[in-house]
Amino acid sequence: MKGKKLQHAMNLKKEESEQALQSAKYNFEGICTERDRYKDDLAEMKLRNRELLNTLLKNLSERSLGKGKADVSGADEDFEVL
């Protein structure tokens, strides 16, 4: 009888461990999905910012023909341009 109880307890513990592992895998996959979505969104924002910066620089250069250059120091750095 003791052996059956012990085996049953061990089986329950193993089942709990497997459930905990599955839960951890599910949570990890969710975190990775969110991270990938964040990276994609960030890449799109950087591309859009680069396009906006290029448009701004083009407009500035067209407006200031012969009036000197606009100060765009740091424009090639990786930062948000609003």
Image (cartoon, helix red, strand yellow):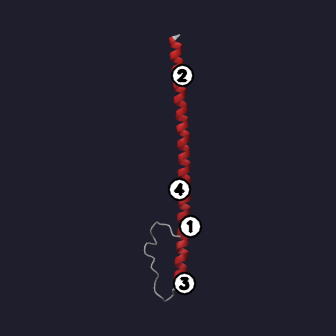
Position of residue 14 measured from the top left corner of the image (x, y, whole percent): 52, 26
Residue at (53% x, 14% y) in the render: 4
Residue at (43% x, 75% y) in the render: 73
Q: CA distance from mark 4 to mark 2?
A: 42 Å
The residue that label 4 is drawn on is 39
Position of residue 47 measured from the top left corner of the image (x, y, whole percent): 54, 65
User: In the image, is 72 to the left or to the right of 40?
Assistant: left
**Residue type at the position of mark 1:** Arg
Q: Of marks 3 and 2, which one's residue comes earlier in the chain?
A: 2
Q: Which mark is residue 11?
A: 2
The residue that label 1 is drawn on is 48
**Residue type at the position of mark 4:** Lys
Q: Residues within 10 Å of mark 3 (few under 14, many from 20)?
A: few
The residue that label 3 is drawn on is 62
Q: CA distance from mark 2 to mark 1?
A: 55 Å
Q: CA distance from mark 4 to mark 1?
A: 14 Å
In the rendered image, the vertical position of residue 57 relative to residue 8, given as above or below: below
Q: Quadrant of residue 55?
A: bottom right
Disc 3 to disc 1: CB gap under 8 Å: no
